[in-house]
Amino acid sequence: MQSCVDAVTVPFASSVFSVTPGLMALAVIIGVILGIAAALLLYVFVLKSALIRKFQKRDAPQPLKTNNSGKEKLNKGISDSKWRPSKTKIRDSISLEGSTSPANNDVTEFALKAKVIYPINQKFRPLADGSSNPSMYEALKQAALPNQMPDDSSSSSMRSFAQDDESGSGPLAECSSLTQNEKFQSVTSYSEALTSTSCRMSLSNVTLQYLRLLDADLRQEKYTVYIQLLKLHLNDWLSKKKINEEVYRVIISSQEKCLEDLKKQCKHDVSDTTNTSAYCNIMEIEKSEDEYVKQSLKNVNDFLHSLDNVRHCLLNKAQLPYNEVVNMVLAVSELMTWMDTILQDCQLFWAKVLQERLIHWKQQTKTIQSFQWLAEQESQCKLNAICDTMEYLTKHGQFRMEEKEVLSAELHKIFQDKTIFYSNECMRQAKDLIKKLKKQYVERASETKQIQGDERMVLLDKVNRQRMDAGAFLKDYHDLLEKQRKTISDLDDEEDSRITESIGELWKNLYSAFSQTIEDLTKDIYHQILPKRTTLSLNECEHLRQQVKQSHLTNLEKIDNYRRQCLKLYQDSLVHEKQMWIEEQVLFANMQAHLIEREEKTIERMILRLCGITDQAKEYLVKEYRLGLQAMLRQLGVRHLGLATLTDMRMSRKKSKLQDLKEKHSLDGIMPLWDTRKLQNEEFRFLKEEKQLENETQQVLSAFHVQLVTELQIAQQYLQSRLKDIAGQALIHHARMEAAKISYESKDDVKDKLADAVEESVYVTRDGVCTLVQIYYQQVKETVEAYEQDKSKHKKTEKGVSMPLYTV
């Protein structure tokens, strides 16, 4: 060794350098070995972990992508055999994943490093809720079911409810709690909302559509009655030779054309809502409603002007006496005012029916969609139970930690795929079933409406032939239409019941099939996977499965009780909404009564200032104003009903949040998992949210009330403008009548009266001077008396002030 050292330390410039080949080779080998060892240590302790993080981030979503077989199943449809898991395929996939541990050392090492240690009072479940794999957790959030809030946690087990008060996604949680700018699915019937991801908003939008259809139907009835009343009066005059056929034809054709234009505009306004795009937001709906109410008020004004055109035509073309024309117009106006009153009561009645249907469908959608939530909970509970079993076996040496992590991740993916497949299949089959049932309903409804149209034509022909009384016709025609509406409503109720029963039965069957699939999958894991991967016998694995099954049934019963409790809370909230709606309608009715009373007093004061017009003209003014006021109030009633629905849509987000808090608060009564302090915090949050909801609701109602008052002012402007026209025409007619009276008097009498008036205005007469003097002396006398009274009061005041001075 010393010789080697001496050889290495030979002086550099002293002699010829000589090398031993054997020692040089040894030194090279040692250097290579040390370099490899250093590179391995650098890779293991520095580069390896960085590379794992990099590739894990890049490939995180891949382990949770749904396999192609699931997509093929979804496209082909579902059957009993498809719900049964392929035992060979599941067993092979899990066994393959567990038997390739040497090739998956990086994955297992990452799983060991990435596991999360739960708090002391919670169980250690590395992959039961996806917390050991961040990418898995994110993927599960993205695959949230449609009835979940988008920002809620994906963990939905009973244990998750107790652990995280912020992640409570209850069975009735909605993703429909949107802001004003966010889009939601637009549907055209209540049944289609069953498959909508924003059921509450879609149902409210359907209610607005039905309100427009109701308004259009009532307007159609009003126009038909009006033209028929006009025909009855004009036919009577035609038979008495007061008018000719040309005048009759001109008046009827012009009125029918005007009403046809109004009907087209009404259909266009209705189509703006019923033919909307696939998605819309609250702001677009509110804008459409604003335009609709303005157009409807304008249509009322145009209809009133059409009645004025009839009067002008009869006076100018038919040259009929003014009194006869006014009497005819008064008779029509009085009947049309009565008609508007009947239609307003009818409108309120069917609005209540719509509100009942809306509440019914809200309850049905939540009940049906809660089965989807129940399936998710069952899948999660099964997965938690299996993971707990593997955790127990790992602690007793049956599993290595890395094997357990890999197996748990694979099971998590399988269970999640089954749940997503179930959710998608429920939606697909429900849409197909609704489409099929709706097609049958449309056919029956079309036949019924055709029969009803023939019934209306028979009644109108009967009126034209028999010339029945106008009031009797109005009553008979309205009763017929109400009977027909009742028939269509019963048909709708029958269809609603059939659809809800069919969809409920479908989802129950799919849920039963899903439960059986999860049970078969669990059985396959305990009978096929665990005996091969552990030293446990088949009987021991079966014993573990029975224990897990018993525990699962207990938890599932608690979950179902929680679901039923949430449905009961939601039903109570719907009852409260209904009561609030009724109170709003009572307040609006009182506002209408107050407005009518105030307008009546206003028109009375106006008539008192119109001196000289006849009593007939005054009656004409009053009845025409009442006709316009009643028609405007009915349209504002439609607007008020729409605003109530828009308020519910505006507050949907807050109501959903409050509903979630109610559900979480009710959970403590079923499963007391919260401590006292946490429960108090939840109660405080609930009261705070409830108060905030009440305040914001009042703000929205106030804003809509201001909007309604603005639209009422627009209606008043229309009415005042028309009232001025009618009053001006009455005054012109009165002036003409006075001029006509003067023309019948003697021209000499007129000259004498004019001469006396001119003389009295120009020259001073004795009588005029005496009158002026008397007035002057009377004013002087009053002035003197007032002066004497002021003087006496002043003396008394001075006397009272001087007395104390003398006393001092």
Image (spheres, rainbow, N blue to C red):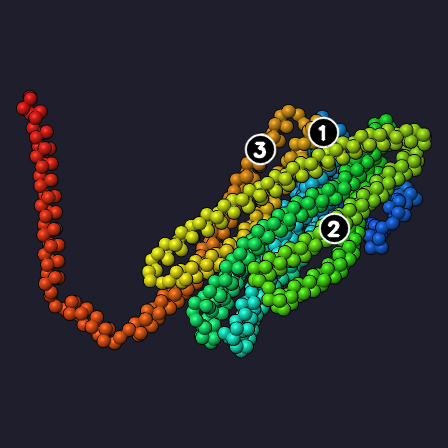
| Left or right: 602 in relation to 534 | left
Residue at the (61%, 49%) spot, across then down: 349
How far is the residue under mark 3 from the one under mark 1?
A: 21 Å
Counting other residues with Cα less than 10 Å from the Cα at mark 2, is it few (<14), some (14-19), or many (20 or more)? few
Counting other residues with Cα less than 10 Å from the Cα at mark 3, is it few (<14), some (14-19), or many (20 or more)? some
* Image x and y of residue 227, in percent: 57, 66
Task: Say above or below: 595 vs 620.
Answer: above
Determine the secondary structure under disc 2: helix
Label count reads 3
Task: Say above or below: 637 vs 653.
Answer: below
Q: Amino acid at mark 2?
A: Glu
Direction left: furthest residue = 806
Determine the secondary structure under disc 3: helix
Residue 670 has which mark?
1
How far is the residue under mark 2 from the one under mark 3?
A: 40 Å
Residue at the (23%, 76%) spot, across then down: 748
Name the one closer to the observer, 497 or 458. Answer: 458
- Report the residue marked by disc 3: 687
How far is the residue under mark 2 from the one under mark 1?
A: 37 Å
